Amino acid sequence: MDLQNAEQRITEIRSMLNHYGYEYYVLDKPSVPDAEYDKLMQELLELEEMFPALKTADSPSVRVGGAVIDLFVKVEHRTPMLSLGNAFNEQDLREFDRRIRQAVGEEFSYVCELKIDGLAVSLRYEDGLFVQGATRGDGTIGEDITANLKTIKSIPLRLRENATLEVRGEAYMPKRSFEALNKKREERGEELFANPRNAAAGSLRQLDPKIAASRRLDVFLYGIGNTGESGVAAHSEGLDYLDRLGFKTNQERRKCATIEEAIAFVNGWVERRPHLPYEIDGIVIKLDSLTQQAELGTTAKSPRWAIAYKFPAEEVVTTLLDIELSVGRTGVITPTAILEPVKVAGSTVQRASLHNEDLIREKDIKLGDKVVVKKAGDIIPEVVNVLADQRTGNEMDFHMPTHCPECESELVRLEGEVALRCINPKCPAQIREGLIHFVSRVAMNIDGLGEKVISQLFAEKLIADVADIYKLTGEQLLALERMGEKSAANLLKAIEVSKDNSLEKLLFGLGIRHVGAKAAKTLAQEFGTMAKLATATNDDLIAINEIGAKMADSIVAFFEKDEAKELINELAAAGVNMEYKGAKPVSVEDSDSIFAGKTVVLTGKLEQLSRNEAKEKIEALGGNVAGSVSKKTHLVIAGVEAGSKLAKAQELGIEVWDEEKLLEEINK
Ligand code: IVH
């Protein structure tokens, strides 16, 4: 076949695939058997492989998932992605209605929609072409997940009109896909997803789009970022417009003239919810007219013209088999209810935290009781209450111990606290939990080093403190249960990568009392380096807005301890970064900058720019400036007399620029 014939055939196949795909995935009305679609897709893939010049960004072949990406680039949302205020009962809804009437009078209508339980996504189209898809992130800055979103077959790669717009919606995993996925994971001995929402979010956060492609995700679009010139005057018209453009919107929407009609819609769905093929967690009620929406405006967090009615959490009854005690990293003893396994809100629950002794007394919980269980926020299992009238007389009172279940030292209750604590600093449970905290996602984020591996390493005395993690060898890891060559190698890589984390991750990981993730970030930003923070006085600390006296005391006390000093020296010697990297978010406008999402290391003496200027410029263009060269480094800028870092970069085959080239790129 020659190029011309191939082009013709490719155009033909693409048009058929787009048409069949639209019928199947958007309209839910397939007109050809799956095998036919698959056969055409195969032919297209083969032709594109033979004639790579004919590949396009909107070819349906991208649905199978393209190349693995290195990392998710940050994306700034031009219009913030807000969340919704919640209503939990009819009274809340009537109160919302009262506020609306007060603002716009009596002439208005609502649109009621299903609240899809997935994750919010933003899709940008330019001249009808899908160019960028992002997560919500913190509402202002999300992550670019275009490659993964392209695998969702109901997301059009090209619109039916050449519109330029941003649309928003919810990506989700249908119940059947979720069940099939978990079944497969169970067979393979992999960890199960707690619910379809987590599974959808997990799938879209994979660096390999082929994984997302295999997960059978779907989407419903429910809004337009900026209606601009589209001539749309009401939300309902916007949804119809989205339909015309080829998007998948949820058809179970209803225009309601009054809040009573909206309440009837809500109540109808309380009954019908279990029969839907996807999870919903409520009903969204929106004021229809865009002019009226603008009159009401938004708060910093959510629009005043809409509200989400949240369905009450499902409650089930089960038996409390036992109460287990665990020692946390700060020594707090937490009782956990061990339950007869029971299915609630989409997954099986067998444990629920009971928090502390007071709560056990308040709820009058006895061993053997029948208890009502729900998932708070549909995620965290919770014992709601006890069914005391179902007691048989065999139930037993529960008493908290007087001594630590792990190290047997006497427990204390600190003044003003409800918790019982083990205050032995050498308590192995506390040390182990501290190690688990250090490697966790929120702290140093060492992939593959979870609770189980840490517990084994600790039990085998291979690690006693966090610095020991950086001394682990492949051999030591291989000796662990269920650890293969590949996992061990990956783990070592993940440990290596963690050395480059910005200071706040390390600070939080160290588990300094009262220093949470947010405070760690503030401290890293304010002081810039561990050395500066370590020598900060109480006054220096309190001078910072978000740092109170209690935290300041705790920080000073921490850095005064010899063990802490030694630990930090050891970590630094192992190559763990001790500086704040302050990666600035990349805005949509400059996400195509050559530095976007790249980790850059500066070495040697720069002549025209100071180190700091270079750093600021690179960061402003979306780059990250790191202190040391590792496999994660994308680029090294070598000035005069560059030494070992340059050598290492060359050894690792990392791109190296001189200052000239840097200036050229910065000034582009
Ligand atoms: S409207 C300005 N409509 O619910 C807020 N949101 O906190 C625009 N969601 O994560 C949201 N279904 O992604 C809207 N039909 C629907 C929705 C919906 C699900 C999600 C949304 C956000 C959360 C709201």
Image (tube, rainbow, N blue to C red):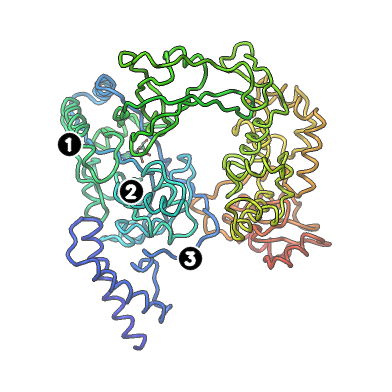
Q: Earlier in the sequence, mark 1 or mark 3?
A: 3
Say whether marks 2 and 1 touch (CB < 8 Å). Answer: no
- Whether residue 87 sits left or right of residue 260 in the image: it is right
**Cα gap from disc 1 to disc 3, whole angstroms:** 43 Å
Q: How many residues crowd around disc 1 within 10 Å: few (fewer than 14), some, or many (20 or more)?
A: some
Dot 3 corresponds to which residue? 67
Amino acid under label 3?
A: Ala
Q: How many residues crowd around disc 3 within 10 Å: few (fewer than 14), some, or many (20 or more)?
A: few
The local secondary structure at tag 2 comes to: helix
**Cα gap from disc 2 to disc 1, whole angstroms:** 33 Å
**Cα gap from disc 3 to disc 2, whole angstroms:** 27 Å
**Where residue 204 appears, x then y in whole percent?**
43, 52
Dot 1 corresponds to which residue? 255
Q: How many residues crowd around disc 2 within 10 Å: few (fewer than 14), some, or many (20 or more)?
A: some
The single residue placed furthest to the front in the displayed view is 394
**Where residue 57 appears, x then y in whole percent?**
40, 67
